[in-house]
Image (tube, rainbow, N blue to C red):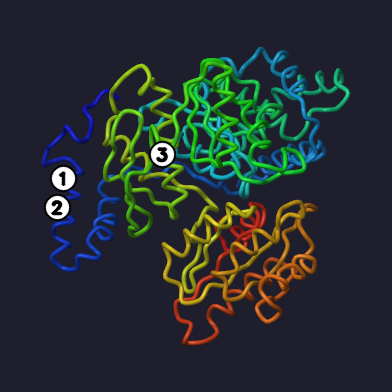
Amino acid sequence: MSEPRPSDRHDASQPDDTFEEIVGEETQRDPDLAVIEAGSRTLRTYAGSPQGEAVPARPTDPETDQALRAVEQELAGRWGETKLEPSVTRIAALMDVLGEPQRAYPSIHITGTNGKTSTARMIEALLNAFELRTGRYTSPHVQSITERISLDGSPIEAERFIETYEDIKPYVEMVDAQQPYRLSFFEVLTGMAYAAFADAPVDVAVVEVGMGGTWDATNVIDSTVAVVTPISLDHTDRLGTTPAEIAGEKSGVIKQGATVILAQQPVDAAQVMLKKAVEVDATVAREGMEFGVTSREVAVGGQLLTLRGLGGEYEDIFLPLYGAHQAHNAAVALSAVEAFFGIGAEQARSLDIDAIRKAFAAVISPGRLEVVRSSPTVVLDAAHNPAGARAAADGISEAFSFSRLIGVVGTSGDKDVRGLLEAFEPIFAEVVVTQNSTDRAMDADELAAIAVEVFGDDRVQVEPRLDDALEAAITLAEEDDEYAGAGVLVTGSVITVGEARLLLGRG
């Protein structure tokens, strides 16, 4: 952790010099492709093993699978994630009877509107690179509920998930009996995560809020580092109708004396966050001021970055994720880990560049511009609001040279569907509207009516079943020779993406 800054090092055996050699070799062949080719080859040089299994399959043992289904059924019988009573009273009571497991380890708390899960995964990978044992809690899951609770980069095994639930179940029932409302689905899962992390035990927990901040169930931790990813309009019925109002709710994760890592924000949201930081004597590091993305280049399989952190500049970082938004997430994640180690405020040094490179090169983020099939190429992205859709549209336009792109869109009924469709309209030649299998899904015909207003009748096809929608989109992408190189983007909801992932054989 106390290695010299990259700019102070020069060793022909180091990967950064290998990168320069590759660039030099490739420049003689094609200057425009030099950095891209170097990125692909540098990935193989830098990368260690990818993060653990990101999306686990169902348990192969029938008894374990049956027991996991029983737990899932019991959890599903509680208030869902969208039905909330804004209070941390119940989760605080559960923590009390469990012996305050969330205080057994330091934590990094992540709020914001978009990019939370990807940022959490990057933070986790960086911490693992410095041999710290991590617990990560994120939501929602793409396919398996066990994804939400991870240890050292891998979702906890189904057996451990079941054991954790059974261990805390008597205490959950005790709290249920004492409160006006039973603990919700999300509150019980949060309790499970904090208990599992204490039991492991972990060196640090990386925790993503479920919704908001102040009254979110995760907000019973006293994190030394609070991360705020970009804020935009989402969940406006619960959090507020302006970025400033939403920021007011999310600022609740900023604790006394903490360090706040603040991604680029709308001006009014930033003002709210800064005011909160002053009130609790927190230190603020702002993207574009104290840290940021110095440069980035599209590369095969991702992008090459130079990041400016709190302790200096980190060059030749390969990130195997697409889109400018992921580069900004990387800058936020790096600065959060630096802040956790006390760099910037307490110490003027940088982290080991080789460890940073290996960590970023191994990052995966399922359902975030994830390629799951070729011929034609099918990409999944969990964008579910206009800001996320704009980031996905920019990312896919930059990273893929599709001659024609077909959209498959299935959304939840409580989202800004028109705004999402408008963000994708410039890049979709045609769109197949559909719906996922949950009660929250917007009816396909209702979605189609909005899509026709945005795209026009001749560019919209309706397929209520997701499997039919995928087949229709793939057929459209393949239908004419002149459209060789066409692709499909499945988007609109994490749930839609997760179900598509299963249908396409990735589960």
Q: Amino acid at mark 3?
A: Gly
- Neighbourhood count class around disc 1 (C-alpha, 10 Å): few under 14, some 14–19, many 20 upward: some
**Residue 189 rendering spot, x and y as whole percentages:** 68, 32
Q: Nearer the viewer, residue 186 or 277?
A: 277
Q: CA distance from mark 1 to mark 2?
A: 6 Å
Q: Nearer the viewer, residue 82 or 192?
A: 82
The reply to whether callout 1 and callout 2 are in contact (CB within 8 Å) is yes
Q: Amino acid at mark 1?
A: Asp
Considering only vertical position in the picture, is 501 above or below 172? Answer: below
Q: Which mark is residue 17?
A: 1
Q: Amino acid at mark 2?
A: Glu
Quadrant for the N terminus in the image: top left
- Neighbourhood count class around disc 2 (C-alpha, 10 Å): few under 14, some 14–19, many 20 upward: some
**Residue 359 rendering spot, x and y as whole percentages:** 36, 39
Query: From the viewer's perspective, is the residue at label 3 or at label 1 nearer?
Result: 3
The reply to whether callout 3 and callout 1 are in contact (CB within 8 Å) is no
Earlier along the polypeptide chain: callout 3 or callout 1? 1
Earlier along the polypeptide chain: callout 2 or callout 3? 2
Considering only vertical position in the picture, is 335 above or below 283? Answer: below
Q: Nearer the viewer, residue 466 or 398?
A: 398
Task: Look at the numbered disc 3 and give the secondary structure of its residue.
Answer: loop
Task: Look at the numbered disc 1 and give the secondary structure of its residue.
Answer: helix
Q: Which residue is mark 2?
A: 21
Residue drawn at point x = 55 percent, y = 22 percent: 277
Q: CA distance from mark 2 to mark 3?
A: 31 Å
Left or right of residue 151, residue 473 in this image: right
The reply to whether callout 2 and callout 3 are in contact (CB within 8 Å) is no
Task: Look at the numbered disc 2 and give the secondary structure of its residue.
Answer: helix
Quadrant for the C terminus in the image: bottom right
Q: Which residue is mark 3?
A: 288
